[in-house]
Structures are given as structure tokens and as C-alpha cells.
Image: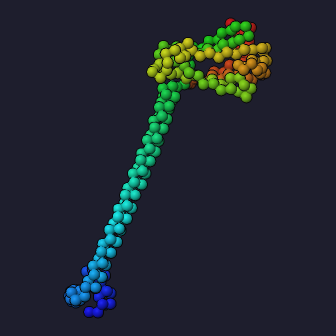
């Protein structure tokens, strides 16, 4: 077997792709030619080194993907935990704002008016000892309160004992029958249409501001 033929067949021989007859001829040639024998051994070593480098590269890629997957898993856990926390917070807020607090039954609310000079104080107080009232109000475009929602709330751990136990009051100060003084000291003109809507569970009461003024002169 000639040298160039041996070298051409060497890769196939190393991979075990040559026939038995060819293997015999190559082994006989190596016994007779140390140069070709060394060539084959060097090729085997190069292939082993190349294979080892490839395995290290593959292992590095696997380790990298493992790290990326671990980081992504941690990020996902953080995102899920954050979303869960937000959900729990929203559920808690919903419970205390809507389940644990509801529009009051008008029969459970004691409403009073008190007069002092040109001031009328409208007060709301729960008739039940284990309940508190909470009001939500809104301003008209003129700056005075025109809507009041009256809510009931249980006396539980979420409400400080001193909170609202004496009821809730709104004060209206009149300069004359057509003018009201706002909390910020500004004066606002009122008309016969200006009123306060008080919302309860099954009823809405309406009090016209001029009627409030009239109670100053005729409290009875």
C-alpha cells in the first residue's frame, strides 16, 4: 500500500469504516512504515483533543442554558409572587371597602341638625353600638358639598376604637340666604336648586341649601 493511499484511508480507518481486508493491508503497512504509523497516531490524538474540546463546549453551553433557565425561573417566581401580593392586597381592600362596609340602612342612622348663629351642623350617627358610620362626599362645581354617601362599618380590629364613635358632622355657614361660606373662607352664591343628596341603602334624601338656611330662623 502506498503512503498517499494510507493517508487517504486513515480517517475512515479510525472511524471503523474500512473493510476487514483494507484494515489488514493498513496494519501491514504500519508495521513496515513507522512514518505512517506516527501519522495515524497523531491523527487519533488530534481527533481525541477535538472531541474533548467539543464536549467541553457542549458542557459549557449546557451550563449556560442551565444558568439562564435558573435566572428565568427566579424572575418568574418574583413576578408570580408580586402578582400574588397585589392580588391579595386588592382582595383585602375589596373586603374592607365593600364586604366589610356597605351603604347604611336609613333606619340605622340617627340624623340631627344643630343651629348656632348662622351655622347649621348636619350630623350622622349609627343607632347600633357595634357599628360605625363612614361617609363619602363630593363637591359641586360651586365648591360646596352636594352629595353624601353614608356607609355602615362593623366595629372590628380594622377600625380604631376612637374613630367615628361620636358620629360624622358637616357644617354649613350662611352669610345670608343666597350666600354660603366654604371651608376655605371663600363665598359662594346659592340658588333654589342647590341641594344636598344623601344616599342610603334604599333611599336618597334631598335637602335644599335654602331650606337649611330657613331652619336658622325657624329651627322648629
Q: Quadrant of residue 215?
A: top right
Give the residue at x 45% y 20%: 156
Q: In the figure, is residue 38 to the left or right of 220?
A: left
Q: In the figure, is residue 112 to the left or right of 160?
A: right
Q: Can you say which quadrant of the picture contains the N terminus?
A: bottom left
Q: Quadrant of residue 119?
A: top right
Q: Can you say which quadrant of the picture contains the C terminus?
A: top right
Residue 213 or residue 3, whichever sits in front? 3
Give the residue at x 71% y 23%: 144
* Vertical placement of residue 21 versus 14, above or below: below
Number of disc labels? 0
Give the residue at x 48% y 34%: 89
Residue 208 seen anywhere in this rendered image of the structure: no
Q: Residue furthest bottom?
A: 2
Measured as percent of width and height from the top left, residue 121 is found at: 66, 13
Give the residue at x 52% y 25%: 102
Residue 201 or residue 37, whichever sits in front? 37
* Vertical placement of residue 131 versus 36, above or below: above
Residue 97 or residue 73, whichever sits in front? 73
Q: How is the image coloured?
A: rainbow
Amino acid at each position: 500500500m502506498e503512503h498517499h493511499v494510507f493517508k487517504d484511508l486513515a480517517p475512515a480507518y479510525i472511524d471503523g469504516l474500512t473493510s476487514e481486508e483494507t484494515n489488514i493491508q493498513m496494519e501491514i503497512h504500519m508495521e513496515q512504515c513507522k512514518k505512517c504509523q506516527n501519522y495515524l497516531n497523531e491523527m487519533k490524538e488530534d481527533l481525541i483533543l477535538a472531541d474533548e474540546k467539543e464536549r467541553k463546549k457542549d458542557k459549557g453551553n449546557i451550563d449556560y442554558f442551565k444558568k439562564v433557565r435558573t435566572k428565568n425561573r427566579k424572575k418568574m417566581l418574583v413576578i408570580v409572587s408580586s402578582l400574588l401580593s397585589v392580588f391579595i392586597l386588592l382582595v383585602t381592600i375589596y373586603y374592607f371597602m365593600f364586604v366589610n362596609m356597605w351603604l347604611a340602612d336609613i333606619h340605622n342612622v340617627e340624623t340631627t341638625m344643630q343651629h348656632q348663629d348662622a351655622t347649621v351642623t348636619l350630623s350622622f350617627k349609627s343607632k347600633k353600638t357595634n357599628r360605625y358610620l363612614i361617609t363619602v362626599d363630593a363637591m359641586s362645581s360651586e365648591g360646596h358639598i352636594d352629595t353624601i354617601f353614608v356607609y355602615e362599618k362593623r366595629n372590628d380590629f380594622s377600625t380604631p376604637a376612637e374613630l367615628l364613635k361620636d358620629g360624622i358632622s358637616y357644617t354649613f355657614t350662611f352669610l345670608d340666604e343666597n350666600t354660603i361660606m366654604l371651608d376655605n373662607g371663600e363665598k359662594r352664591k346659592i340658588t333654589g336648586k342647590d341641594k344636598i343628596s344623601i344616599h342610603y341603602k334604599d333611599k336618597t334624601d334631598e335637602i335644599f341649601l335654602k331650606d337649611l338656611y330657613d331652619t336658622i330662623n325657624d329651627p322648629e
